[in-house]
Image: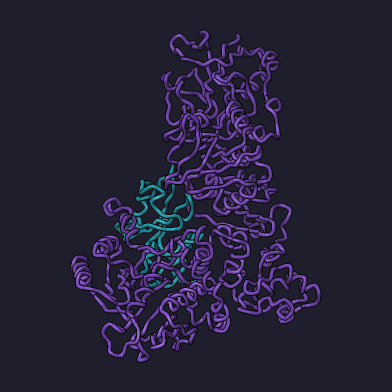
Chain colours: A cyan, B purple
Amino acid sequence: MSWIDICAIDDIPLRGARKLKTALGCVAVFRTGEEEVFAASDTCPHKGGPLSEGIVHGQSVTCPLHNWVFDLNSGHAQGEDGRIATYPARTEAGRVLIDVARLATRSAA
Amino acid sequence: MTLKLVIVGAGMASGRVIEHLVEENPDAFDVTLFNAEPRGNYNRIMLSPVLSGEKTYDEIVTHDEDWYARHGVTCRFGEHVIGIDRDRRVVIGQKGEVSYDKLIIATGSAPFIIPVQGKDLPGVITYRDLDDTNAMIKAAQEGGKAVVIGGGLLGLEAAAGLAERGMQVTVVHLMGHLMERQLDEAAGYLLRRDLEKRGITIRTQASTKAIIGNGQTEAVLLEGGETLPADLVVMAVGIRPETRLASDTGLEVARGIEVNAQMQTSDQDIYAVGECVEFGGHLFGLVAPLYDQAKVLAQTLLGQPEAFVVKDIATKLKVTGCDLFSAGDFAEGPGREDIVFRDPSRGVYKRLVIEGDRLVGAVMYGDTADGTWFFSLIKDGTKIEEMRETLIFGPAFQEGASADPLSAVAALPPEAEICGCNGICKGTITNAIASGATDLGAVRAQTKASASCGTCTGLVEQLLQVTLGDDFQMPTAQPVCGCCDLTHEDVRRLIKAQELKSQEAVWQELGWKSRNGCHVCRPAVNFYLLADWPLEYRDDPQSRFVNERKHANIQKDGTFSVVPRMWGGITNAAELRAIADAADKYNVPTVKVTGGQRIDLLGIKGEDLPHIWADLNKAGLVSGHAYSKGLRTVKTCVGTDHCRFGTQDSTGLGIKLEQILWGSWTPHKVKLAVSGCPRNCAEATCKDVGIICVDSGYQVGVAGAAGMDLKETERLVDVPTEAEAIEWTVAFIQLYRENAKYLDRPYKWVAKVGLAWVKERLIDPVERARLVDAFELSQSFFRKDPWAEQAKQAERFQPLADLTLEAAE
């Protein structure tokens, strides 16, 4: 694990998302609660919709293009045969941390 | 041999250490106890009942003079410790030195004072010890107004106590909901509701700028300029470990005094215990871990092996009548699932957080009877897979029962209005049912309820079912989505009838089955709330579809389109030049003239949006709302200005209408047109509102369509003056805003309620004036350019970070 500090929790709107540029493409960081965050691929496997622009509800996000709903815990699309990659993310003392090691191993794998 | 033990601070943690010592080996230590307060150990947690008058100080004393005398503790109360000399192993008090073999620092915590102007004025107090409590009790005797800064555990207990003693209390809280560290938004909403019921005003997302007063506090000034009168200001924003003595002594101090699992500081003969310590990065504010520490420390001093471990803790608020419970980790970290249960009729909310096959967190409000059981499941890490389905119903209820979808209607008071058209309340309808009206038709005939626009039909049917039980066969109605059992019409009506003014209020009172809705219901509820409560409810961009949140239309490749407003389709060379310059500067691949008489710039990157908006703003161009469920365009012809057939100034009227209506949110998009003569060059007869100018005045048509359906407008009214044409148009749009289902265009809504019903409402000059006023009130918030506001926060449109390099390493 190699956690790096990405931003303050308030940089991401509550029930919203921001995106990160990585070597694997854009990763969306979702804030589902006051201190609850998830990180996952920003790209919908259906038609490539930007998930960071979707409506965030519970621990899910709805793609803005065609309403595919993804569970941010597993990355699985509800009722569809599709999945997005998820990455470890957490909050600590009001900051958002992402495990970059995981992003790198993914690219090597 | 008896060792000399000196303790600095007589609080609950050090008190517990002494209890353990005298119990297990009364002769091991000769104890000297310093305390800055002129008294010994009392139960600090019970200060809130003292403040509210439910208990007296004497009832909360843990150790009195007798107790200390009996156990041979030398008390030096009311005496400050000035320093510690580690070389000579002495503690230096104001009245002289004491030598020690072992030393315990238990200095507790100090209230955090926010560094604002006026923080030192008389009348500003913190809430930490008995003196603070007495100061509040004294202040409350004078009556008057109090402002409590901080909506956490301590602040709310102070607020409730002061309200109990007759003060008018306002709580100012920085975050979006109360007790955000212990509660989620739903429980925070219920807590707020209960506190408001006892007359306490709650201000969330409010930041204190200064405390104002001349020799005595008079008011609290908020960021944003509002002042709250205050004879008393209680600062309860948090506490920090009191570490000054320890750091002056040269001990290792981070946020608190650093200790190992034996509570030993960086000096092997000096220990620390309580709120002043930091262990493994943790600070401690609740009593349970402090007692654990005290036990460990006593064992260590007695030479027994013992180690302190951090455990989950549970929280309860000590305000009579506010029943809440929170435990474990309910708000942090991925990989978790929620189980939510709400019972609106009893004001109950429960949420369990599950990770894998274990319960990791629980929040409860209204019914906390099962709190201890859930807490033990969390602490013990019990596998819950077997009882997962029924877990939320508690230990006594393993049969499983589902929430009653009718409970929201059952919970309504008899005077709640069900039918807005005819002003029929619940009591009238249930009386009619009781006296023999056992189906919808009979209720309609007897009471007129649901006999006009019909949007409350679902509610009347639910009342029939609640009252008649199985004797009534419920017709199937389409609920908004899987999150609830109510139709759009029911939700709208209940938002009005129950005066629900926040999303949390809707989720709770209408029995939502998810934590905060979904992409189907949340945009609808957001619109209903802002349309019905423009003063109280603030639009939530996170509940809007991307286009409305970004103020641009997302395209299939993820780029956006930008359409500036051209009032009534009129533009000029300067605006066109600014648009051309922007097209060059941002490499816009496609520039298109739209059907709504304006220009569309397509293919703009998300990051560029705030910049292109700022550039267009400079030329006086504002958002065209080409993306919104709101007013789009008012198409016009050139009217009397240039056309030889024009009968009225159609361009002028179009511009006026667009300037009145722009920025408003509506259930779906709204398009208007004004034609200067019946030749209808502006194609007004297929719009949501289309006005045809004639010699004698204006023909206002509504409910046209030229999309999926094609439909000619229906004539609403003919009026002689331009002012009346505007008045009827605005009133129609407001009626649509107040009544239509989200995502119904006006033609669909009119088809449901009937044009006759619409006319009947609008023909009444009082109702028409009310609608126009209500629209104007709402527009005082929304008639402004969102681009100008968004352009100010350009950084929000950029990626958070570029990790391309890190990730590749």
Residue at 54% over, 40% down: B147
Task: Decide which of B743, B338 is in the foreground and name it.
Answer: B743
**Could you tell me how many numbered marks the image carries?**
0
Residue at 69% over, 56% down: B346
Q: Is residue B402 visible?
A: no
Residue at 35% over, 49% down: A6
Left or right: B13 as drawn, with respect to B620: right
Q: Is residue A97 visible?
A: yes
Q: Position of residue B568 (x, y in %)?
A: 32, 76
Q: Position of residue B537 (x, y in %)?
A: 51, 59
**Quadrant containing the N terminus of chain B in the rendered view:** top right
Task: Decide which of A65, B334 is in the foreground and name it.
Answer: A65
Q: Is residue B590 above or below residue B523?
A: below
Q: Position of residue B543 (x, y in %)?
A: 46, 63
Q: Is residue B718 above or below residue B119?
A: below
For residue B479, what is the image quadrant?
bottom right
Left or right: B166 as drawn, with respect to B557: right
Residue at 37% over, 57% down: A18
For residue B417, what is the image quadrant?
bottom right
